[in-house]
Amino acid sequence: MPQTPRAVAPRTWTRRQALQVGAVAFGLQLPQLLHAEATARIARRASPRVRSVVVLFLSGGPSQLDMFDLKPDAPEDIRGTFKPIRTRVPGIQLCEHLPRLASQTHRCTIVRSMSHEETDHVRATFWVMTGGRIARRVVQSSSMDRNDRPHFGAVITHAQHPQEGLPPFVMVPEFVSPVGVPRPGQHAGFLGTRYDPYLINSDPNEPGYSPGAIARSADGEDLQQRRALLHSLEDIGQRASEAPLLHDFEVNRARAFDLITSPQAQKAFDLTQESRRTRERYGRHTFGQSTLVARRLVEAGVRLVQVNFVRHDNGKGGQGFDSHASPPNPPHLEWLKKELLPPTDAAFASLVEDLADRGLLEETLVVMMGEFGRTPRFNKNGGRDHWSRCYSVVLAGGGIKAGTVYGASDQQAAYPTTTPVAPEDLIATIYQLTGVDPHGWLRDLQNRPMVISEGKPVVGLLA
């Protein structure tokens, strides 16, 4: 006979135990990551032209000269040894190691005139994810702060009603954290924990992959214990430092419980639903399988998914796209050829192909970008260093002109020669496509008004 679920008595939990158990059994972050009713309305310019956005973030700084903006007539110490190849669109060339992306250029716009002034990873990452410069002093070990400007995904989900049973904003597979702490700019900042991304913090390419709290519960008793734990937190003494956390937890706990029991959410994160052939097409690596998760989430109705190319200094993913080639790291071009370009090529092309085949590309915007590019000349170690004055971004999907190049760079891909695009302009364009007025206002923690975007939508990118 089935056993009666056991209740969890609130008095048996200390504050520390409750928070620890909640983090493990439930994912204490979960209620904070859900979209609640908007308490401050964001003005809208027009109906959204896209339903969802997928950001493929190439952490470290992808080289424009070796990927999207080759200069075959430049000296070898600038052009390198990679050859340009023809693409689906006459006149557009890409690196020879991006053959599948080359077959999708008729669905893409390559922006070759991205430009800003920040060559520090932390500050540049913040700029391209929020559309504004960080106002506080930061170092390489700096992390996220509630006084910061929000990630544009948080602003979009703050403005829109989420699909029931799904988190509106998801980060896969982990935060950008090459030195061990999540870099600033990746959560909702002053908008509050309710608009933070849902973080799976698990590698979809590993046998033990789990989407976190959304994972299917082993049995009903476990869910009853989680529900009881939520109730028990009400009775825990609230210190001032914990009050905001518990307040948000209380506001969203019912919705959180609905989410972890949602078959729709469980199915969306479940890669066992995909065929072996499909998984191989995306590539059996972290970036490819994470991108496949993103496609499934978009199909289910998630508003924004960011897929981060995993990199950890002296750890998993190594230097990522930050290929200075300092020993013991391999030479820049060898690292690109073997470790970076194959997964990037497979993941991006498969995503665009699948979205097009499923009739979803017109309502989904795909953005592949990094925080900056690489120097025109190789350094003494055979690598390229940080360069932000000119770099490339690739766009595909809804609302974007297809089969074209926007902007141009000089003979060394060092500076834009036409139509420079700043990070805030790109994000203002994303806002406009998703129906958010980039010139609307938000209020920070001190109730001060702050314009949503300091940039202007790039009209030349819009279809």
Image (cartoon, helix red, strand yellow):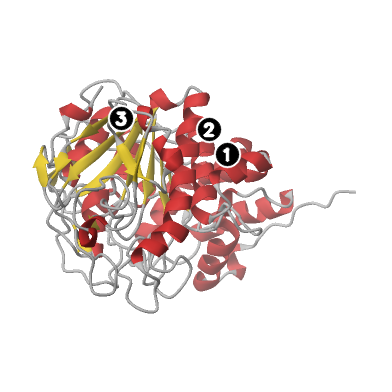
Give the quadrant of residue 374: bottom left
Name the element at disc 1.
helix
Which three-letter amino acid code belongs to the residue tagged 2? Ala
Q: Earlier in the sequence, mark 1 or mark 3?
A: 1
Q: Which mark is residue 268?
A: 1
Q: Which mark is residue 35?
A: none
Confirm or deny contact between disc 2 and disc 1 (CB under 8 A): yes
Mark 2 vs mark 1, CA separation in Å: 6 Å
**In this rendering, is residue 345 above or below 28?**
above
Name the residue rendered at 32%, 64% in the picture.
322
Which three-letter amino acid code belongs to the residue tagged 3? Thr
Name the element at disc 2.
helix
Q: Is residue 301 left or right of residue 84?
A: right
**Residue placed farthest to the right in the image?**
1
Q: Earlier in the sequence, mark 2 or mark 1?
A: 1
**Residue tagged by mark 3?**
434
Rendered location of residue 164, percent (x, y):
50, 32
Rendered location of residue 409, percent (x, y):
15, 44
Mark 1 vs mark 3, CA separation in Å: 22 Å
Rendered location of residue 420, percent (x, y):
12, 41
Foreground: 282 or 126? 282
Name the element at disc 3.
loop
Q: Which mark is residue 300?
A: 2
**Residue placed farthest to the left in the image?**
417
